[in-house]
Amino acid sequence: MQRRILTLIFCFVIFFPATPAKEVPSIYVDKKGVMRWEDTREEASFFGVNYTLPFAHAYRAMGYLNVDRKAAIDRDVYHFARLGFNAYRIHIWDVEISDINGNLIENDHLDLLDWLIYKLKERDIHIILTAMTNFGNGYPERNQPTGGFSYAYDKCEIHTNPEAIRAQERYIASLAMHVNPYTGKAYKDDPSVVGFEINNEPCHTGTQQQTRDYINRMLAALRKTGNRKPLFYNVSHNMQQIEAYYATGIQGTTYQWYPVGLVSGYARKGNFLPYVDDYHIPFSHVKGFENKARLVYEYDPADIMYSYMHPAMARTFRTAGFQWITQFAYDPMDMAWANTEYQTHFLNLAYTPQKAISMKIAAEVAYSVPRGQSYGTYPADTLFAGFTVSYSQDMSMMNTKEKYFYSNHTSTPPVDAVTLKSIAGYGNSPIVQYEGTGAYFIDRLEEGVWRLEVMPDAVPVSDPFAKPSLHKEVVTIAWNNWDMTLRLPALQDDFEIRGINEGNRYSTQAVGGVIPALGPGVYILQRQGYVSLLQWDADTPWNNIRLGEYVAPQPRAQTYTVFHQAAAVTESGKPLVIEAQIAGSAFPDSVWIYTDRISFWSDNNPRYPMERIHGYTYRAIIPGEVVTQGKFRYTIIVSRDGNPTTFPAGISGTPLDWDYASPMYWETRVVNETSAISLYSATRENSRIETYTMPEWSRVHRELIDTCPETRPVQRFICESDDENPRFFLRSYVKEEIALRTKRLGKSNTLCVSLQNAPDSLNIGFVTNTGYTYAAKIAVNEKSVYRIPLSELQQTATALLPHPYPVFLKKYFDPVVPIPFRPEDIELLEISFDGRKNEKAIIEIGDVWLE
């Protein structure tokens, strides 16, 4: 059956299978805690995502945007299939489908969940339902009143209050018995539903007996329904209850992992591979641990746009014995342009193509890496079982005889181009040369016939992890035509191309492997002279899709956007390279840079052209003679058909218009090439320092002390913790302070810091691009400036900050492979010192520099 869904925003075609998906075997947990397929008794392994469109903010946002919610689900589930997922998990917002007594309410939320499950089954994607969240439905908005029972109780009371427990028994039983009208099966009887997790991140503050009683009552309520599916419970919260969890009848345990914290408010930078080297479970000795299945209900390397982390985390999960791994959370395509659902997470095939391809690679890690297999300690484990993860290249890769997947440009050739069956990637490789900035998939249908799917271009507009709003775009979509060159032995140099998705009439002959002016869509590629064994067209079923299916957002780039970060500092007299990402409804006729030294009244106003170098990246080189000490301030003017727009203000006109009045500029500090390299200054606006405490949280107050013209200002940090023997950390990302000062850096041999009040001793040093930490200890006395030779910095453990979740994970990475310190590798400045419980520790920092 073919169904066309048209909206004002999106244009695509989805072909539904002509027949229902074949029945799948159920999952059971054996006596050793291993999830197995009921028919073959083989081990199961699952990888996928959380996705929340039927509930909460995502549900409401679809309404704000006038989007058909079922059609939106169809779109996203197709992308799940293209990314190779076989797992889906959701924590159901019970407040939206229950009343005050725990009765299940048949409403639009439940209907959408039913529809979602139906569509997942069609794609052979398996499901775990977390029955309750026991909290509100607001984030990032305010909670919406619904009358659901969870609103009547505090989350930490709901597991002990007798009335609340009765409501939960009633609710969870009704949910399990609910018959999905689209599948005709109750959740408890649907083999695509792997099992039930009782609730999301419970809060148990009572005794262990109370915790056991609560869990066993939930299990009993489900057993009475006739449920025979495995039942799971969260064990990564409430560490004082660990023994209680394992003393119940649950068959599996669920965990989370947020290795670099949550909700930073901006995109983090750095090498986080040491953070995901190990998932150590300190309670693995507890009785019953070994006979419970292990599942990851949520994980995400939050607040980063890198594409190297997901496969590394999947590897570590498999080493730790996990069989179910679901990321949190996949953004619905219809609202991903704003990333409002959870600002700290950002994942969507169309809008984050590199991260999405890395998720496809991570899925393959989950399916192919044996459970319990170890690949050593970082950095040895960056190459494993046909996979590569690289911070320096911001890339993950799968490279086997049949599969060649890469999340960024790569020069690494496939293991064997002749035997390849599937390619997925972003950018250029020895097989594909492509200037577009969307993902692509190339799959062999038979020897001389391949399917090519090309996504439109994703272009960054603003930091996706800043405060979210449906009035602010973070990534825009552009549809452009680019040449694509394929070097596939199976196709040779000359082959035919024809578009097969709805409305795609593209047809041409590739010569020399070059497909000219290729736009987004789906194509059949057939080697010249090859006679196909089968007929391949839009309606042909293939794996869990039909060949002509295509889902992509329509162009959003209706006005010009400029995404650019000015260099923090450069040296006078040296050319300054300026790059920006520029997108609009069409390529601009011209892009220019003006400095702040121009004037409407002057006849000599130099400007500097920006040239497109690839994709949407434009570059200008500012001559060294105009880069003088002080501040270099500039604007970027984008013009099309004689209509200029000036950025960063984003207003019509140019700075040479008589009535142009915007004070907005990008700005780079310019210093003498012989001056010391400033890493931190108490008075510099962009000198961001983050504060942390080991082992847990602390109270930190900071203030600028600038009381006397005769002394330099200092930043005062007052730290206090309720923990025994706390250690306080101050960190600042300083890579941008050294990036354009390589010559001066090569002559620097001393780290200097000016201090006023400070603890008796402290450590100071750097975290480098290897993820390693190098520090020296200094004794604080009456001096105001301390100089530490760089030769005295010693390799030490790296503090894993910000704090990972769950809290039981290791706090430090201890390297086993020595890597020499190199100043050019510096990324983070770190200062740390000890404190005492409930006592204030004060440090006042003026400047930090290299000389």
Image (spheres, rainbow, N blue to C red):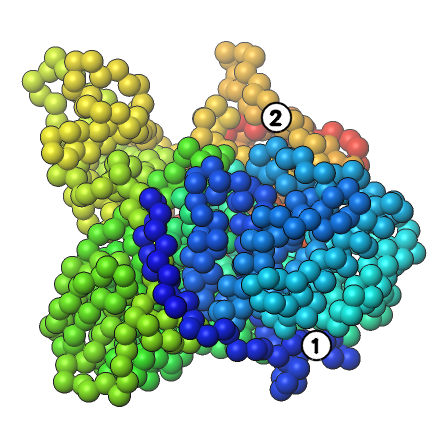
Q: Secondary structure at mark 2?
A: strand
Residue under the image location 43 percent in, 71 percent down: 17
Which secondary structure lies at badge 1? strand
State whether residue 359 is above or below residue 760.
below
Q: Which amino acid is tagged 1?
A: Tyr
463 shown above or below 355: above
Residue 503 shown left or right of residue 43 in the figure: left
Residue 652 appears anywhere in the view: yes
Of mark 1 and mark 2, the one earlier in the sequence is 1
Question: Badge 1 is on which residue?
Answer: 28
**Which corner quadrant of the image does residue 705 belong to?**
top right
* Residue position for label 2: 702
| Left/right of residue 645 with respect to residue 256 in the rendered view | left
* Residue 560 percent location from the top left of the image: 25, 36
401 relative to 376 in the view: left or right: left
For this orientation, the residue located farthest to the left is 603
**Residue at image x 56%, y 12%?**
707
Q: Amino acid at mark 2?
A: Arg
x and y percentages locating residue 67 in the rendered image: 43, 45
- Against 178, residue 194 (above or below) is below
Residue in the image at 35% along x and 79% along y: 421
